[in-house]
Image: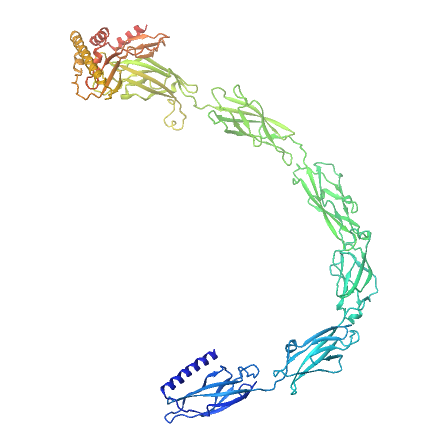
């Protein structure tokens, strides 16, 4: 950064100098310049090269820009200008870089610039020549940067061992000198170092220090040191110095335990063990030897009680020592004897015993002989003896050790699981200690589990000899109705299973009841019926797989109102004249009801549906199993209060007549249903707008196609024929009406024939109307005889129905053809009725002129006709 600033300042000064020169203000300010001076190479920093003065113009008060080297040729920073005081200055060396005559330019031109305060400037050149100086010779290569160490093997023949390289800056011839002169080495004129003898490491010095001096013709010299080490070769055989061959150690030594310290010597090592290598030649996993020190250590577990040491307690090892550079070695045979120690506790296999004995077993019974299952694997007999002690544990007072040697466990007491003094324990946990007789008296614990096997001494006992359950007859199938329970005095209690062994069925079901095998819960499998069976008795059994007992179960079926009233008849068709007197028993109809679980006085009768305007009522309404259908009010069709001619009554019969109003909310009520169909027969003299009948209209349509030339001809001819036929029929109808004279009421209702509308002849519509009137259009069953009869709803005529005769078809059919659509003719219902047969028409007129019969007479006439 500093050099960069200097360069920038010099550039600025050069610019100012040039600027001053151009402006013509330059004057002689540098005294003693230009000039030439010399300096020796390798001069240190601060060496004075040249001195000069600065003079200022008369108008100047001093120097504005001190003398500065603004440029050099060649460019260098090896020089600088410093002040000596006042206006005296000198040029000195900077030492950066150091001047070198051999490698750098030998002359430099320095441009020096100065400016006074009046603005006057001066620029002059100082030429500096570098003088050559004689320099010391210089070592090159490794010798120049470090102390060189040379290794020479013993027994090596004399010869060249190293080459020293040196040079002189003035490139003159150099001389080499080796000191001290007493060493067995020499150096040539070219700098090659030679050994002058064959070295013996064991006899000669192991290291030599040589001073190598190089000198130029002017006597300048340089000196460096070279170290020469004699390297020993393995030419001697090592040998063991340890004489002991037998060692004894106890078994189970920790890894790292030192067994022996094997030593050896090598003449080549001069009592230094660093070059010897120890090893065990025989294969053994128990010991290892330190390869450098020869220390023999335990590396693996040594178990005297395991094979093969159990039979042969000696371990033989072959130890070898060798040096690191030759095949010379020596071997040493040693034997290690392993001594047994008491390191194993007595062990039993198995370590826990499980025995089973029945309760109430006679005391004195032998349970287990522990001696047969225990042993100590130590080899030495003094270490493998043991004894049994310390019988303890819960219930140990019922058992004992026969002796400490045999370890026999004997039962001493009687155990009854059902005894109240007994805590009810089934398994007794005992412990026995087996222990070494030798120090350190290792021991183990033996666990003995004695299970007292229960004996099934008692039979199950039901809490009750018999069970009685009361069950409603409407209880759902699958419901629980009760539970039986039995206990077993055995301890622990045996698992009791329940079953039904007799009497749980009837004639319809094999099993009416089911019992849970584990809980004794009794459930019903079929619907109970009080009206069929009021009581069920069956036998249940409780068993513990060995013993069993029984108890009786009685199921009382509680009556519940679960039967509906059943009435006869449950469906009936009736007909009555429109003017039937109020209070009349309709057709003498009577309903009779019965209920399997209700009193005959419990019935109530009411009409639930179809009784429009309340024309019908039952008498009596409650308190009897029979009731009659009564007409409660007259029919009124003339004022259109009544419009329905057929009544479909839905009659409900309930069995709650004897139940108080307070109990009806909770009491179970059943309802029977009877359906009655009642047809009101109108008065023959009364015009009825709802006379049964229907009209069938059939349409047939033909489409005209202009491409058919014959179509207009056929349509025209057909139309003429149809108009002629209609005119003829109209004349006949007019003549008949004049001769017979229709009723005034009906004549007023005859429809007029509308004039036909004129339409385009495009399509033809033919309409056919069919009028259907019934003769015997109803049937019913006589309540007295039970026979079926037919009746006419308009005239009231009746007749007995033959058993194989179907209902007479209600077809008194009169067909009348209608005109085509373009004619617009039509026939109404009055015209159709006017075409009836004369005989039928006469019957209707006679019926209309007769006065209506009284209701009582009508009943008598009906009875006579049916009779």
Q: Is residue 405 left or right of residue 149?
A: right
Q: Is residue 698 above or below residue 28?
A: above
The x and y percentages for residue 200 are 79, 74
> Residue 701 lies in what quarter of the image?
top left
> Residue 849 lies in what quarter of the image?
top left
Q: Is residue 389 left or right of residue 463?
A: right
29 and 499: which is toward the camera? 29
The x and y percentages for residue 18 are 40, 84
359 and 134: which is toward the camera? 134
Q: Is residue 801 above or below residue 465?
A: above
The count of marks equals 0
The x and y percentages for residue 143 are 66, 77
Q: Would you say residue 636 is visible in this rendering?
A: no
The x and y percentages for residue 543 are 62, 29
> Residue 544 lies in what quarter of the image?
top right
Q: Is residue 86 above or below residue 690?
A: below
Which quadrant, please, contains the C terminus? top left
579 and 418: which is toward the camera? 579
447 and 73: which is toward the camera? 73
Q: Residue at x 72, y 75 (%)?
A: 161
């Amino acid at each position: 950064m500093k050099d960069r600033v200097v360069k920038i300042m010099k550039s600025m000064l050069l610019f100012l100098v040039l600027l001053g020169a151009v402006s013509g203000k330059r004057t002689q300010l540098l005294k003693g310049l230009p000039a030439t001076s010399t300096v020796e190479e390798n001069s240190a920093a601060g060496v004075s090269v040249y001195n000069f003065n600065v003079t200022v113009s008369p108008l100047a008060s001093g120097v504005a820009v001190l003398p500065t080297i603004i440029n050099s040729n060649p460019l260098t920073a090896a020089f600088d200008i410093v002040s000596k005081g006042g206006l005296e200055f000198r040029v000195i060396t900077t030492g950066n870089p150091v001047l070198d005559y051999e490698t750098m330019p030998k002359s430099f031109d320095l441009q020096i610039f100065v400016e006074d305060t009046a603005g006057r400037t001066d620029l002059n050149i100082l030429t500096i020549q570098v003088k050559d100086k004689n320099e010391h010779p210089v070592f090159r290569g490794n010798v120049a940067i470090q102390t060189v160490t040379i290794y020479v093997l013993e027994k090596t023949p004399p010869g060249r061992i190293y080459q020293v390289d040196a040079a002189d800056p003035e490139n003159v011839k150099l001389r080499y000198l080796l000191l001290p002169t007493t060493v067995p080495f020499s150096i040539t004129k070219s700098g090659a170092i030679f050994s002058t003898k064959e070295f013996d490491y064991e006899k000669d010095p192991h290291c030599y220090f040589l001073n190598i001096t190089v000198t130029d013709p002017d006597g300048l010299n340089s000196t460096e040191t070279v170290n020469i080490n004699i390297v020993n070769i393995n030419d001697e055989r090592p040998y063991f110095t340890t004489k002991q061959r037998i060692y004894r150690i106890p078994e189970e030594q920790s890894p790292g335990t030192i067994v022996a310290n094997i030593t050896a010597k090598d003449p080549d090592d001069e009592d230094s063990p660093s070059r010897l290598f120890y090893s065990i030649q025989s294969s053994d996993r128990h010991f290892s030897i330190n390869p450098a020190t020869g220390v023999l250590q335990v590396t693996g577990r040594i178990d005297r009680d395991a094979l093969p040491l159990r039979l042969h307690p000696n371990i033989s090892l072959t130890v070898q020592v060798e040096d690191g550079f030759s095949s010379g070695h020596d071997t040493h045979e040693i034997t290690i004897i392993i001594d047994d120690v008491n390191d194993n506790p007595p062990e039993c296999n198995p370590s826990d015993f499980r025995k089973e004995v029945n309760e109430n077993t006679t005391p004195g019974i032998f349970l287990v002989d522990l001696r047969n299952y225990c042993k100590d694997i130590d080899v030495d007999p003094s270490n493998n003896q043991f004894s049994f002690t310390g019988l303890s544990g819960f219930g140990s007072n019922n058992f004992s050790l026969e002796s400490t040697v045999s370890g026999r466990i004997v039962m001493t007491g009687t155990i009854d699981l059902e005894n109240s003094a007994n805590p009810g324990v089934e398994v007794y946990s005992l412990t026995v200690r087996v222990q070494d007789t030798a120090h350190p008296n290792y021991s183990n614990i033996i666990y003995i589990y004695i299970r007292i096997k229960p004996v099934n001494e008692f039979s199950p006992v039901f809490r009750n000899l018999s069970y009685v359950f009361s069950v409603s007859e409407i209880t759902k199938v699958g419901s629980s109705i009760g539970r039986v329970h039995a206990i077993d005095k055995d301890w622990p209690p045996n698992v009791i299973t329940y079953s039904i062994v007799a009497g749980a069925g009837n004639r319809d079901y094999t099993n009416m009841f089911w019992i849970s095998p584990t809980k004794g819960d009794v459930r019903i499998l079929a619907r109970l019926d009080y009206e069929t069976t009021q009581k069920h008795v069956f036998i249940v059994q409780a068993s513990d797989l060995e013993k069993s007992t029984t108890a009786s179960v009685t199921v009382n079926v509680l009556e519940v109102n679960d039967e509906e009233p059943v009435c006869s008849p449950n469906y009936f068709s009736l007909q009555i004249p429109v003017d039937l007197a109020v209070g009349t028993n309709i057709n003498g109809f009577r309903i009779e009801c019965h209920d399997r679980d209700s009193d005959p006085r419990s019935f109530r009768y009411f009409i639930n549906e179809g009784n429009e305007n309340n024309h019908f009522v039952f008498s009596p309404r409650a308190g009897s199993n029979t009731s009659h259908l009564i007409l409660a009010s007259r029919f009124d069709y003339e004022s259109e209060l009544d419009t329905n001619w057929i009544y479909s009554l839905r009659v409900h019969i309930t069995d709650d007549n004897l139940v108080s109003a307070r109990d009806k909310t909770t009491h179970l009520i059943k309802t029977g249903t009877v359906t009655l169909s009642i047809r009101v027969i109108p008065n023959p003299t009364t015009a009825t707008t709802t006379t049964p009948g229907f009209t069938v209209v059939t349409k047939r349509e033909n489409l005209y196609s202009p491409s058919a030339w014959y179509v207009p001809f056929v349509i025209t001819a057909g139309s003429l024929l149809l108009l002629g036929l209609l005119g003829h029929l109209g004349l006949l109808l007019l003549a008949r009406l004049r001769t017979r004279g229709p009723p005034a009421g009906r004549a007023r209702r005859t429809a007029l024939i509308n004039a036909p509308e004129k339409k385009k002849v495009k399509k033809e519509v033919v309409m056919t109307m069919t009028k259907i009137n019934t003769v015997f259009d109803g049937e019913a069953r006589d309540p007295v005889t039970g026979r079926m009869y037919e009746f006419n709803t308009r005239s009231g005529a009746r007749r007995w129905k033959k058993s194989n005769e179907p209902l007479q078809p209600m077809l008194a059919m009169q067909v009348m053809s209608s005109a085509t659509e373009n004619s617009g003719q039509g026939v109404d219902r009055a015209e159709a009725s006017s075409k009836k047969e004369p005989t039928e028409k006469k019957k209707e007129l006679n019926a209309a002129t007769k006065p209506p019969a009284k209701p009582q007479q009508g009943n008598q006439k009906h009875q006579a006709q049916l009779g």
